[in-house]
Image (tube, rainbow, N blue to C red):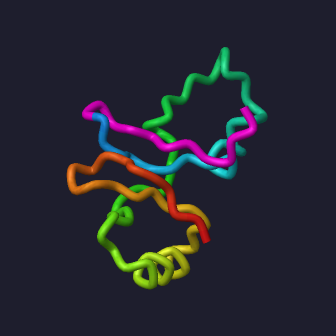
């Protein structure tokens, strides 16, 4: 679809992580017909995530420290409400 990232949710609808093209790169050479790896088994950036009440400077510092370009923002129930991007 051309998307650079995809929010992954768990069975309860809470944000489970952010999947990027980089995460999918090892699977591009494989056939999806013969290799069926569930998304939950792919190593991706997981919690903690930014929250809506987190100061922007704190979020930016955390993203830089973790080497993230994009970071999910979740509400207090863990549901994604947006993305932060540096």
Q: Which residue is at a point 66% across and 42% down the rendered structure image?
A: 24
Measuring from the top left, give residue 15's x and y in whole percent.
36, 46
Compared to residue 34, the image places residue 19 above or below, namely: below
Answer with left or right where residue 52 lies relative to residue 76: right
Answer with left or right where residue 70 lies relative to residue 59: right
Answer with left or right where residue 4 lies relative to residue 70: right
Quadrant of the frame with the C terminus: bottom right
Compared to residue 51, the image places residue 59 above or below, namely: below
Residue at the left extreme, as displayed: 77
Measuring from the top left, give residue 62's x and y in whole percent.
45, 78
Measuring from the top left, give residue 22's x and y in whole percent.
68, 52
Compared to residue 23, the image places residue 11 above or below, namely: above
Q: Is residue 31 magenta?
A: no
Which of these two is toward me, 44 or 61?
61
Q: Which residues are magenta?
A: 1-12
Quadrant of the frame with the N terminus: top right
Q: Is residue 8 magenta?
A: yes
For residue 53, what is the image quadrant?
A: bottom left
């Amino acid at each position: 679809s051309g998307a650079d990232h995809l929010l992954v949710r768990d069975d309860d609808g809470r944000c489970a992580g952010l999947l990027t093209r980089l995460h999918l790169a090892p699977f591009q050479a494989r056939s999806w017909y013969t290799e069926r790896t569930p998304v939950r088994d792919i190593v991706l950036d997981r919690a903690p995530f930014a929250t809506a009440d987190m100061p922007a400077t704190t979020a930016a510092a955390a993203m830089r420290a973790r080497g993230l370009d994009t970071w999910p923002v979740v509400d207090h129930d863990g549901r994604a409400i947006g993305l932060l991007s540096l």
